Image (tube, rainbow, N blue to C red):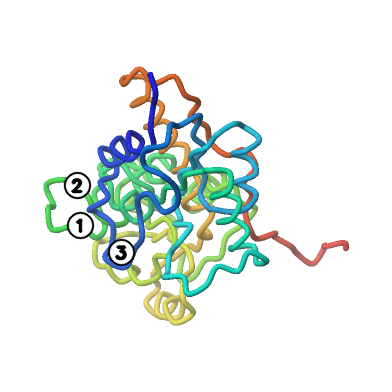
Amino acid sequence: MAVIVKDILEKLNLEAPFNLAESWDNVGLLVGNPDQEVTGLLAGLDPTNNLVNEALTKGCNTIVTHHPVIFKPLSTINTSSPEGKLLEKALSNKIAIIGCHTNFDSAAEGVSNFLGQQLGLDDMRPLIPTEDDSARTGLGTIGKFITPLSAKEFLQRTLNTLQLPGVQVTGDLPHEISTVAICGGSGSDFALSAKKCGADVYLSAEIKHSTAIWAMENKFCIIDGTHYATEKPAISLLVQKLQNLSKLAGWSIDILQSTDERHPFTFMDKNYQP
């Protein structure tokens, strides 16, 4: 059966309702025609020129990204800039781009919850619940390990899950870790909430210097796992959900996850050789 972009939006709204998005956010269909037939769907974390090129290579005319391709109002579109080239390329090739951002963060099974699952947390609940607490929606998550982990075990598990060679840590890493709070992406502002909720460790990204100093002074452990690494795992969840919905609906389109995306930062140490 033919699938149109509007069908993708309807299915996404079931798993990550767009009304859960923060008021400052920009989600939904950001580029393209809602009535266009979908030839294939490619999901990624970031809307980049590389992702559009990958979609073209794989025969996908619909892209779903976590971060919105248009976030702030545009005063100009300069097609000599990377941002302008992306929009020009998408429009000229009739590629629809959908943003699934803070609505996916706040979904009952969203970004932070999935990262918590990958770490092995149990009994998770939102760190910052929405008004409808019974729906278990909200930003971040907090949960417990059935069996507490040693500091070494927890750090190793975190690095393996995030696929990072190392992380920045502020405050004291407890010898035993039972309760962990998580906010995938930029979560510096939720550090105090994590401490008040009884977390032994708070895992997030883009931790402000002032927040790191506060954590150090209060002997509260915060781990900065980078924005990319704390959100990237959830793209596989998004793809899995869309594939399941596609199967139930009888769609015959490929729903793929980007294989070309890479962490924007390169980790270097004193042994670096140019």
Query: For the residue marked with disc 3, what is the amino acid?
Result: Ala
Q: Which residue is mark 2?
A: 136
- Which quarter shows the N terminus? top left
- Taking the spot 43% from the left edge, 40% from the top edge, the residue there is 118
Residue 211: % across, % down:
42, 77
Q: Are marks 2 and 3 in contact (CB under 8 Å)?
A: no
Residue extending farthest to the right is 274
- Which quarter shows the C terminus? bottom right
- Taking the spot 47% from the left edge, 37% from the top edge, the residue there is 236
Name the foreground residue: 83 vs 157.
83
- Taking the spot 30% from the left edge, 35% from the top edge, the residue there is 11
Q: Secondary structure at mark 3?
A: helix
Residue 193: % across, % down:
27, 67
- Taking the spot 34% from the left edge, 56% from the top edge, the residue there is 102
Gap in Å between the C-alphas at discs 1 and 3?
12 Å
Between disc 1 and disc 3, the foreground one is 1
Q: Which residue is mark 1?
A: 129
Left or right: residue 84 compared with residue 10: right
Q: Residues within 10 Å of mark 1 (few under 14, many from 20)?
A: some
Work out whether 195 lies above or below 30: below
Query: For the residue marked with disc 1, what is the amino acid?
Result: Pro
Query: For the residue marked with disc 2, what is the amino acid?
Result: Arg
Gap in Å between the C-alphas at discs 1 and 2?
7 Å
Residue 92: % across, % down:
58, 48
Left or right: residue 57 compared with residue 205: right
Q: Between disc 1 and disc 3, whose residue precedes?
A: 1
Work out whether 197 lies above or below 56: below
Q: Which residue is mark 3?
A: 194
